[in-house]
Image (cartoon, coloured by chain):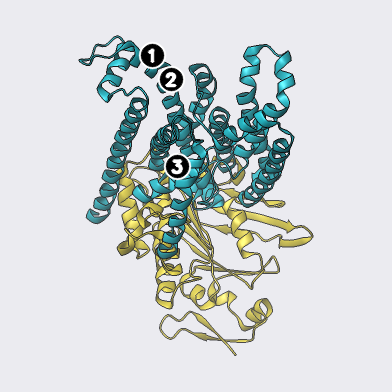
Chain colours: A cyan, B yellow
């Protein structure tokens, strides 16, 4: 008993430590992200401004300008970064577990490209539509379409792979590849149709950006994203069992088909609304769960909350670089995440050859 | 009692099972034998509830398998698959603890750990507890999976009724060396002694003769023979079912029949 108990306790301590480290990391990334920029706001003042909003007085002075910059510009952007990064991270973790495939991420089952195609269509063809719609609807049209496109793509993939109430995961992966190819062709066609100004908009959106996030847009997309991201960790035990195989998970007493359906819908909700808010940000859903697994192993009960924390931190830091590297312009954040994520993933692949497992 | 009656399964025009009936009682070890393609694994999948038969019915304690809630069923029967891959690096202890999934909320963590440790010892993989599962050899993986399925139903907490529990093993000795083949069947015998009904698909007739209470021979999707090793392992029957001429002799110390190909 002694050895097994000791081993289990060691694992538990390691998980707890990781939770603290990742949470503190997110806190630090947040203070850095909201503090750095043309108007620098030291961490103490950030806390003071936030506390003041809640009616608590902290011993740091701040100017009205700092307050305005933080509350109106930096804070919605940082909150969007946390939400989108967390949603992409946890959706990636869930889909990798569901597909028992370490290469799965929201982009693979068609969510991202489906959302992107719908958004691109709105940008290129929607001009005429926006003219006849009331301005509020016109503004909401792009995120709504992106969300709808993501869900529709997921639904198509899911239907192709389902037969008699069962879903074949390998077929689903292949259907995702096919739907992605179709969506990519559609996006290409829209790019071909677009004029100069639309092309700039398209590019920005296809490469992802947290720029231009306001509280209005955030609340609209943030709630469903939060719902998806917060509900996915509830399926941690099902995902652990699913790693053994679908029939094995059934033998262990789980409702396999119901769990699979809910996990796919929640992941599509989280990732689809993320794309709707900020465009296509690649590699976060792929890389974040891998880094977490390196630290604490594949247990989803730890993997999913930690993926939320790490995905959020990663996106905050990436966005910090995106808006400061080439001042006064802004880099699309998707370029940055791909620059970091690509080489990192190659390193993972090489390392795996030596170790024989993820 | 886990009972299958008049089971019919077809894949397209191919009839894989043509009406075999079979029952496993608590405390006995039943070996299912038969040539490749006889329908052994299909029958096991039907008994496990993974595959719904097109004809016939499977009942556990008199209640149709489909009427059981998945979790209640999981507390009563465990299934060892033929192959178990894990793409991610769970430790061996974590894999065995996955077997405790249906006990979540009713067993304490210490109870889970105690059962996991007992099952690691039962399957003779205790020294591997800290190893990463993907780094194990095929035989080691199979024994770890045996520990996992034991952990699912074996060693019930005191006071929780000793109802019938069943262990379905799909070729549990497939990738094991000679010593571990015998070790695995001794583990199955000990589980039976603790009141678990064990059904195992085996290819080695001699192994089945040494450890099983009852042998069931499937051939062409039908029951070819059923009974004690004495009754089933005859030269005529093995020739008919496996298309292999054999001599049947006695085990020098145990006295059970042993089959040697001519």
Location of residue B84 in the rendering, given as x and y in whole percent from the top left corner: 50, 60
Answer whether residue B213 is visible to the viewer in this image: yes
Q: Chain of mark 1?
A: A
Q: Secondary structure at mark 3?
A: helix
In this view, the residue farthest toward the bottom is B262
Answer whether residue B146 is visible to the viewer in this image: no
Left or right for A36, reference A94: left
Image height of A288 relative to B117, above or below: above
Q: Nearer the viewer, mark 3 or mark 2?
A: 2
Q: Chain of mark 3?
A: A
- Specify the label residue A73 is tagged with: 2
Q: Secondary structure at mark 1?
A: helix
Q: Are marks 1 and 3 on the same chain?
A: yes
Q: Which residue, given by chain and number where applicable, does mark 1 sit on?
A: A68
The residues bearing labels 1 and 3 have C-alpha atoms spaced at a distance of 44 Å
Label 3: few (<14), some or many (≥20) within 10 Å? some
In this view, the residue farthest toward the left is A59
Q: Chain of mark 2?
A: A
Image height of A58 relative to A149, above or below: above
């Amino acid at each position: 008993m002694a050895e097994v108990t000791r081993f289990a306790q060691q694992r538990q301590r390691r998980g707890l430590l990781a939770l603290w480290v990742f949470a503190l990391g997110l806190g630090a990334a947040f203070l850095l992200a909201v503090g750095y920029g043309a108007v620098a706001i030291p961490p103490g003042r950030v806390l003071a401004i936030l506390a003041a909003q809640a009616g608590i007085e902290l011993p740091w002075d701040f100017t009205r300008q700092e307050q305005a910059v933080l509350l109106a510009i930096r804070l919605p952007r940082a909150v969007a970064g946390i939400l989108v990064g967390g949603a992409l991270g946890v959706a990636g973790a869930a889909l990798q577990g569901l597909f028992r495939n370490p290469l799965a991420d929201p982009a693979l089952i068609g969510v991202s490209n489906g959302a992107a195609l719908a958004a691109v269509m709105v940008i290129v063809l929607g001009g005429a539509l926006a003219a006849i719609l009331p301005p509020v609807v016109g503004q909401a049209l792009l995120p709504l379409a992106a969300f709808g496109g993501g869900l529709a793509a997921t639904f198509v993939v899911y239907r192709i792979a389902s037969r008699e109430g069962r879903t074949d995961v390998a077929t689903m992966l292949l259907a995702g590849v096919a739907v992605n190819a179709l969506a990519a062709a559609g996006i290409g066609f829209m790019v071909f149709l677009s004029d100069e100004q639309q092309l700039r908009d398209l590019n920005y959106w296809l490469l992802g950006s947290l720029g231009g996030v306001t509280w209005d847009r955030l609340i609209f997309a943030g709630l469903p994203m939060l719902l998806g991201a917060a509900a996915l960790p509830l399926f941690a035990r099902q995902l652990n069992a699913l790693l053994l195989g679908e029939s094995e998970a059934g033998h262990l007493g789980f409702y396999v088909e119901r769990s699979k359906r809910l996990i796919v819908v929640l992941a599509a909700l989280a990732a689809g609304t993320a794309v709707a808010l900020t465009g296509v940000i690649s590699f976060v859903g792929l890389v974040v769960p891998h880094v977490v697994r390196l630290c604490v192993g594949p247990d989803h009960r730890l993997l999913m909350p930690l993926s939320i924390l790490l995905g959020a931190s990663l996106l905050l830091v990436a966005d910090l670089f995106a808006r400061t590297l080439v001042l006064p312009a802004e880099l699309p954040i998707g370029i940055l995440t791909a620059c970091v994520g690509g080489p990192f993933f190659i390193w993972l692949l090489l390392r795996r050859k030596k170790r024989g497992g993820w | 009692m886990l009972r299958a009656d008049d089971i019919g399964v077809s894949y397209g025009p191919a009839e894989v099972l043509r009406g075999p009936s079979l029952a496993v009682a608590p405390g006995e070890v039943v070996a299912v034998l038969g040539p490749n393609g006889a329908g052994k694994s299909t029958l096991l999948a039907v008994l496990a509830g993974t595959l719904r038969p097109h004809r016939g019915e499977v009942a556990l304690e008199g209640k149709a398998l489909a009427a059981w809630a998945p979790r209640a069923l999981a507390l009563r029967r465990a299934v060892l698959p033929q192959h178990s891959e894990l793409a991610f690096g769970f430790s061996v202890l974590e894999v065995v603890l996955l077997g405790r999934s249906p006990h979540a909320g009713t067993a304490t963590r210490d109870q889970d750990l105690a059962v996991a440790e007992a099952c690691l010892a039962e399957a003779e993989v205790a020294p591997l507890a800290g190893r990463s599962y993907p780094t194990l050899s095929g035989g080691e993986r199979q024994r770890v999976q045996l520990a996992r399925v034991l952990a699912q139903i074996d060693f019930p907490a005191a006071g929780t009724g000793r109802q019938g529990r069943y262990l379905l093993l799909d070729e549990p000795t497939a990738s094991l060396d000679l010593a571990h083949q015998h070790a695995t069947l001794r583990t199955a015998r000990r589980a039976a002694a603790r009141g678990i009904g064990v059904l195992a698909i085996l290819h080695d007739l001699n192994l089945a003769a040494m450890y099983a209470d009852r042998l069931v021979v499937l051939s062409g999707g039908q029951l070819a023979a059923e009974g004690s090793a004495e009754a089933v392992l005859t030269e005529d029957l093995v020739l008919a079912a496996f298309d292999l001429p054999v001599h049947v002799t006695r085990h020098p110390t145990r006295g059970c029949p042993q089959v040697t190909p001519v």
